[in-house]
């Protein structure tokens, strides 16, 4: 994940400088947008990885309870939905 993050940072920075040289963006004026984009990426990647880990654990637990006969299929479906 760390490699992907830095790859995206360098790609965005390179595009930013290139577009700035072409006259479409002005780095002196628009540089805070770059920080916002990086911050949003960090937040979303952290939230999505947390949700994936949590939901996988929950689903495994529900399936184990279903296999052991502790809950029925309807209750398992309800727990998986929310």
Image: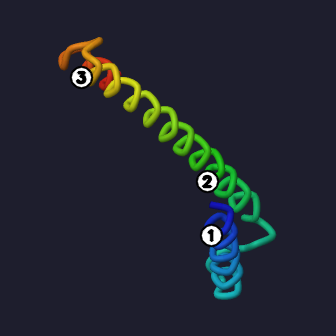
Q: Quadrant of residue 17?
A: bottom right
Observer-nearest of 3 and 74: 74
Q: Is residue 6 left or right of residue 79?
A: right
Q: Say the numbered circle drawn on residue 41.
A: 2
Q: Which mark is residue 77?
A: 3
Locate residue 70 relative to residue 36 in the image: left or right: left
Residue at the right extreme of this rendering: 28
Query: Would you place residue 61 above or below residue 9 in this image?
Result: above
SS under mark 1: helix
Image position of 66 with respect to 6: above or below: above
Q: Is residue 41 left or right of residue 62?
A: right
Q: Position of residue 68 (x, y in %)?
A: 29, 19
Packing grade of label 3 (10 A; few <14, some 14-19, many >=20) is few
Q: Is residue 52 left or right of residue 24?
A: left
The tag earlier along the polypeptide, 2 or 1, is 1
Foreground label between 3 and 2? 3
Q: 4 or 20: nearer the eye? A: 4
Residue 28: give x, y in percent of width and height.
Answer: 81, 70
Q: Residue at x 63, y 45 (%)?
A: 43
Cβ atoms at labels 2 and 1 below 8 Å apart? yes
In the rendered structure, which disc, 3 or 2, sits on the residue that comes first in sequence?
A: 2
| Local crowd size for mark 2, using a 10 Å CA cut-off: few (<14), some (14–19), many (≥20) | some
For label 1, the residue is 8
Looking at the rendered image, the quarter that the C terminus falls into is top left
Q: Badges 3 and 2: C-beta atoms under 8 Å apart? A: no
């Amino acid at each position: 994940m760390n490699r992907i993050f830095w790859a995206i940072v360098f790609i965005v920075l390179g595009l930013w400088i290139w577009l700035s040289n072409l006259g479409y963006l002005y780095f002196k004026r628009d540089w805070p947008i770059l920080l916002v984009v990086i911050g949003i990426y960090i937040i979303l990647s952290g939230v999505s990885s947390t949700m994936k880990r949590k939901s996988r654990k929950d689903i495994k637990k529900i399936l184990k309870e279903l296999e052991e006969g502790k809950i029925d299929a309807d209750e398992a479906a309800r727990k998986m939905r929310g």
